[in-house]
Image: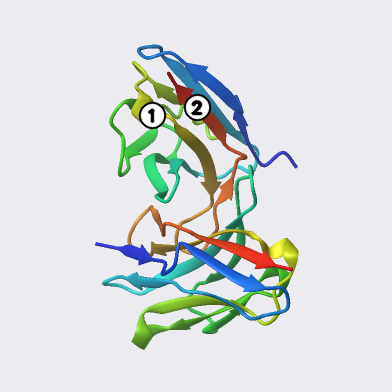
Amino acid sequence: NAGVTQTPKFRILKIGQSMTLQCTQDMNHNYMYWYRQDPGMGLKLIYYSVGAGITDKGEVPNGYNVSRSTTEDFPLRLELAAPSQTSVYFCASGTSPNTGELFFGEGSRLTVL
Amino acid sequence: AQSVTQLGSHVSVSEGALVLLRCNYSSSVPPYLFWYVQYPNQGLQLLLKYTSAATLVKGINGFEAEFKKSETSFHLTKPSAHMSDAAEYFCAVSLNTGNQFYFGTGTSLTVIP
């Protein structure tokens, strides 16, 4: 089982560049999430989706965009990268936030210089 | 608003000693509670979850947690620490009225041989 797959695992960007972090899950989960993790800050929710075609902002959406054209894929786009976006990004999926757990990818470490 | 507080960003225990990681939540409705573990350079994995069944929840690797409504707590314990328990631990909460998970800031556990 592949579970949740994120690519790339590492990336260095220059200020002002753009890129897309890819996330794919093979568990047919409706719910998908993007978090960023910064030291001592825990996980902050960027965007989430409750199904194909439906997305919503989380706690820290500025500077990011998402789309959900299929159940499997939930890419996160960074426009005009800034040093403040240096972080580790995690994609997660689940069946329901009520009783189900989240399944996480291995993370994507992004550095903006 | 929902929040999760983890007391102690760093906890050190001796091998074989009791592990106690604290988590308190605030919620206006009954929550669902989770503990996740993160090993270095990996994503988060579910340790255990409380979803309104038994208040004492047993998880993987000998961990357990007790839901105490009167104290709004969900502390994680393990009777005897093992070197392999060294990791970052996150408490999380979700509600039956929403689509999101809320994470604490994490507790880094060090096990001293």
x and y percent of residue A65 in the render? 36, 26
Residue B22 in the figure: left or right of residue A46? right
Q: Depth check: A105 or B83 in front?
A: B83
Res. B2 mark: none
The residues tagged by marks 1 and 2 sit, at their Cα atoms, a distance apart of 8 Å
Q: From what the image shows, is residue B61 above or below residue A43?
A: below
Q: Please, what secondary structure does the residue beneath circle 1 have?
A: helix
Q: Residue at x 52, y 39 (%)?
A: A91
Res. A110 mark: 2
Q: Please, what secondary structure does the residue beneath circle 2 have?
A: strand
Q: Quadrant of the C terminus of chain B?
A: bottom right
Residue B1 in the figure: left or right of residue B31? left
x and y percent of residue A56 in the render? 32, 39
By what rule are the colours in the image chosen? rainbow
Report if residue A73 is visible in the image: no
Q: How many marks?
A: 2
Q: From what the image shows, is residue A71 above or below residue B54?
A: above
Q: Earlier in the sequence, mark 1 or mark 2?
A: 1
Q: Residue at x 26, y 72 (%)?
A: B28
The residue wearing badge 1 is A85
Residue B42 in the figure: left or right of residue B27? right
Specify the amino acid type for callout 2.
Leu
Report if residue B103 is visible in the image: yes
Quadrant for residue B69, please give it. bottom left
x and y percent of residue A63 in the render? 31, 26
Same subunit: marks 1 and 2: yes
